[in-house]
Structures are given as C-alpha cells and as structure tokens.
C-alpha cells in the first residue's frame, strides 16, 4: 500500500480528503438508501464530455452561476421561495435546513441535488457560511481548485474561527500548489492548516494535510510529527501515499511506519 503516488493521484487523494473531512464534520443526518449518481472526477476526466454538453442550469451551478440574489430569486420563483421560507420559523432556520440536506445528498453521492440545496440555503441566508462551504466541497471535484478556493474564502470570511473551513481551504491551496508550484499557495495553505489544528487539535485530516505541506517544504521531522498527531486523533485520516513519500526521505522517528 505504501507506493508513491503520481501528481494526479495525489491531487485526487487530497480532493477526496477535503470531501471526507467535510462530510465527517457536517451535521449528522439520517441517510436514505436510494440510487446514486457519479460525481465529476477530480482529474477532470468528465470535463471533455461536459464541454460538448448543453450549459448546466443556473440552479445546478454554485451560487446560481454568479447571479445576484435578486436574479436567482427569479429562477426559483419569488412565490415559491416565500412558500419555502414560510415553512420555517425564520429564513435562517430554513437556510440551515437546506445546508444539512445538501450534506446529506453529498453523502449519497448526488452532487447536483446537493448544489441545488446549498444554493437554496445561500439564497435564503447569504450569511450562512456552511452554504459556501458545501458549494466549495462540490467544486473541489473540478479539474482545478480555483472555484473551491473562491467559495471557501467567502465561507471563511463569515466563519473566521471555523477549523473545518480553514482545513478545507488550506487543503485546496495545497491542491493548487501541487498543480502550479506557486509558493504563495503553499504558504497560504500551511498557514490555514496550522490555524485549523490550533483551533481544533482533534481535526485529524488537517494534521495530515499539514504534514503534506511540510513535506513539500522538505521539513520531514515536522511532517512526521504532524502525521502522528493526526494518527492519534483518527487512524482513518492517515494518507499512506504521504507516508510512503516520507519514508523515502527519512525513517519514521517513532518507528511506527517502516
């Protein structure tokens, strides 16, 4: 299992880590059994087919494809949106409900349905940070993390102390560094992941992603320390491709991995 990964597979693993970490931190929901659909692959293998397909409806694009709330309301229908909001004590409560439903559909591997729910959550309450986070998670499946970074930055602006948001965003910057090798992305990603682990030392995936960033900086002892801190929080967070890469540079100081 400890085999070095290619750049593409590493990007896939990091995008998967972003999704898994986000779903683990999302509000718990009863999962329904049903038919699932496939999400776009992080390596962009579906991008070619999408290019020749008709434009996606605005309601299935994050933030309705960049529309203003007023324009998006016209797509949903003002009467329908009011009827939806009337079923809840407040628009904020309605927004939270649809955010939770969005995460539920992500667990069921129905990204289009999830996007629509997150869009509704945003339209009902543009100050709902989790709506941006959910859309950022979906966007992490795109060939580049640019859209995810933009959305998660909006979410972090609304929830600046959220360890989960910082972790997701930091991982996205590391993804982009893996593609572009721009040091600014690496620096930003590391800063966010360090803040994430400081805010929540039990954020196991943030520790593993921090370890990846330290590996990029050739700080192997520090990377090993981060791996083990994440391991202590959750064994399932371990990135065995990273561990393989680290073993090629330096033995595990704790002797756990060989």
Image (tube, rainbow, N blue to C red):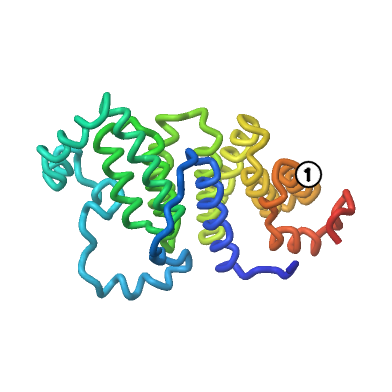
Q: Nearer the viewer, residue 2 or 219?
A: 2
Task: Report the quarter where the N terminus lies.
Answer: bottom right
**For residue 110, which quarter of the picture?**
bottom left
Considering only vertical position in the picture, is 83 above or below 64?
A: above
Residue at screen point 54% across, 57% down = 16
Q: Secondary structure at mark 1?
A: helix
Label total for image: 1
Considering only vertical position in the picture, is 195 above or below 250?
A: above
Left or right of 71 on screen, residue 41: right
In the rendered image, residue 208, in percent from the top left (x then y), is placed at 67, 48
Considering only vertical position in the picture, is 2 above or below 91?
A: below
Q: Which residue is mark 1?
A: 225
Residue at screen point 38% across, 65% down = 37
Q: Nearer the viewer, residue 38 or 187?
A: 38
In the rendered image, residue 25, in percent from the top left (x then y), is placed at 53, 41
Residue 145 can be seen, yes or no? no
């Amino acid at each position: 299992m400890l085999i070095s990964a290619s750049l593409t597979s590493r990007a896939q693993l990091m995008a998967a880590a972003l999704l898994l970490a986000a779903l683990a931190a999302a509000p718990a929901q009863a999962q329904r059994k049903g038919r699932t659909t496939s999400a776009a692959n992080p390596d962009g293998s579906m991008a070619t087919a999408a290019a020749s397909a008709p434009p996606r409806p605005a309601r299935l694009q994050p933030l309705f494809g960049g529309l203003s709330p007023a324009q998006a309301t016209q797509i949903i229908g003002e009467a329908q949106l009011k009827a939806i909001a009337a079923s809840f004590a407040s628009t904020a409560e309605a927004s939270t409900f649809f955010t939770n439903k969005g995460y539920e559909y992500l667990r069921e591997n129905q990204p289009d349905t999830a996007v629509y729910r997150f869009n509704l959550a945003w339209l009902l309450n543009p100050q709902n940070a989790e709506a941006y986070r959910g859309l950022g998670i979906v966007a992490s499946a795109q060939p580049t993390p640019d859209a995810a970074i933009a959305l998660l930055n909006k979410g972090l602006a609304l929830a600046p102390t959220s360890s989960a948001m910082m972790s997701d965003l930091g991982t996205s910057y590391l993804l982009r560094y893996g593609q572009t090798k721009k040091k600014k992305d690496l620096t930003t990603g590391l800063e966010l992941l360090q803040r994430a682990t400081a805010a929540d030392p039990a954020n196991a995936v943030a520790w593993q992603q921090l370890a990846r960033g330290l590996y990029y900086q050739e700080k192997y002892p520090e990377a090993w320390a981060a791996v083990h801190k994440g391991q202590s929080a959750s064994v399932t967070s371990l990135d065995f491709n990273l561990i393989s890469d680290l073993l090629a540079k330096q033995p595990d100081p704790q002797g756990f991995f060989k």
